[in-house]
Image: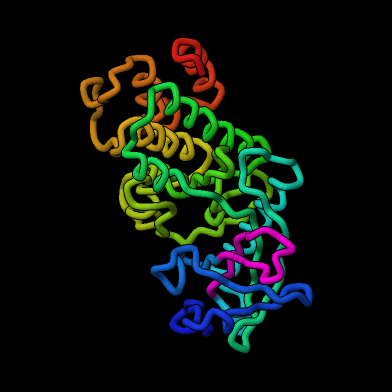
């Protein structure tokens, strides 16, 4: 195992991939057998395996920036993610992936921040694709309700996710949980961790204000745009995710009811109002819950 070109690379000899945590030896295994490392702009993620079998497999997330390089945007983001997971654990948020502990681990003669969380069985993206989106409307509606609950729980403790997409929703024993808190913003007493024109969130899932920030923030143009990525931005991304859950593509441009394959006008109206360009026209979580009630009754959710 070595640290090379900003990534932690596993050795082909798995017995070279040991790390020591709290004076115990654990084996790092790839989440995907086809790759030595894992995706992530600021971190690498591996399965943390106890070779003695005393504890079940968990997941370890390791910051890509070694402490020898000093504090930087990657370590700052990583520390914020740990803070967010600690808050979620303190408040016992059921629909957020479970956090166990954090610390510093030595790899290839350098030290890195890490934290450990529960291992998911799957993520929403793989789950839907592997099943060819062949679920009933009431099943898909139940998925959306569970995801909404997770975001509502985060908002209730002052955390905005800002990176809502299909592969950041994890499935643990049939329960949907929110994962990857690496781009969060805290409602109270927060400093701005974002760079001036940083792309906050994934391409295809960006809110209008995230796009504004990337294209216009502090560029001295004559127009003024909303570049604040917050809880209302989460609503926009949720609208995209709900649409994706129901029909497997993403809404782009001016959507109409005939673009919506399911054809249910009540569900379409809710998603349409979540996807409004201007924040003041978007639904709040309480509005979404209100609109969902008759739909849940209709589909027996």
**Residue 260 coordinates in the image, percent (x, y):** 26, 25
Colour scheme in use:
rainbow
From which residue to which does the magenta span run? 47-64
In the image, residue 289 above or below residue 107: above
- The answer to whether any part of residue 160 appears in the image is no
Instruction: Identify the residue at the far bottom of this view.
Output: 109
Q: What's the residue at 58%, 69% (across, down)?
A: 62
- Using the rendered view, name the quadrant where residue 34 is placed: bottom left
Q: Relative to the observer, which residue lies in front, 218 or 100?
A: 100
Query: Does the stretch in magenta take in 61?
Result: yes
**Residue 22 coordinates in the image, percent (x, y):** 78, 73
Q: Relative to the observer, which residue lies in front, 264 or 232?
A: 264
Q: Relative to the observer, which residue lies in front, 106 or 226?
A: 106
**Residue 144 coordinates in the image, percent (x, y):** 47, 30
- The answer to whether any part of residue 236 appears in the image is yes
**Residue 274 coordinates in the image, percent (x, y):** 41, 28
Instruction: Identify the residue at the far left of this view.
Output: 258
Q: What's the residue at 58%, 82% (across, down)?
A: 15
Q: Relative to the observer, which residue lies in front, 71 or 219?
A: 71
């Amino acid at each position: 195992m070595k640290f090379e070109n900003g990534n932690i690379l596993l050795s082909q000899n798995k017995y070279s991939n040991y790390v020591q945590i709290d004076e115990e030896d654990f084996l790092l295994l790839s989440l995907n057998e086809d790759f030595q490392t894992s995706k992530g702009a600021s971190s690498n993620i591996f399965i943390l395996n106890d070779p003695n079998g005393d504890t079940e497999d968990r997941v370890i997330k390791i910051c890509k920036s070694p402490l020898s390089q000093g504090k930087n945007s990657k370590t700052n983001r990583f520390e914020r993610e740990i803070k967010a997971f600690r808050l979620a654990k303190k408040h016992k948020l059921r629909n957020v992936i479970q956090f166990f502990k954090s610390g510093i681990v030595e790899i290839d003669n350098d030290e890195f921040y890490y934290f450990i969380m529960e291992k998911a069985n799957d993520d929403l993206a793989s789950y839907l694709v592997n099943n060819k989106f062949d679920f009933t409307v009431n099943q898909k509606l139940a998925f959306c309700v569970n995801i909404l609950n997770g975001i509502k729980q985060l908002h209730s403790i002052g955390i905005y996710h800002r990176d809502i997409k299909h592969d950041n929703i994890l499935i643990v024993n049939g329960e949907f949980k929110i994962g990857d808190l690496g781009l969060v913003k805290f409602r109270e007493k927060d400093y701005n961790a974002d760079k001036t024109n940083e792309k906050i969130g994934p391409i295809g899932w960006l809110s209008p204000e995230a796009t504004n920030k990337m294209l216009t923030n502090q560029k001295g143009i004559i127009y003024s745009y909303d570049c604040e990525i917050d809880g209302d931005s989460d609503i926009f991304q949720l609208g995209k995710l709900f649409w994706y859950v129901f029909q497997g593509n993403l809404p782009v441009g001016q959507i109409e009811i005939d673009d919506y394959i399911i054809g249910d006008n009540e569900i379409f109206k809710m998603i349409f109002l979540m996807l409004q360009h201007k924040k003041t026209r978007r639904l709040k979580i309480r509005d979404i819950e209100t609109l969902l009630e008759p739909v849940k009754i209709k589909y027996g959710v």
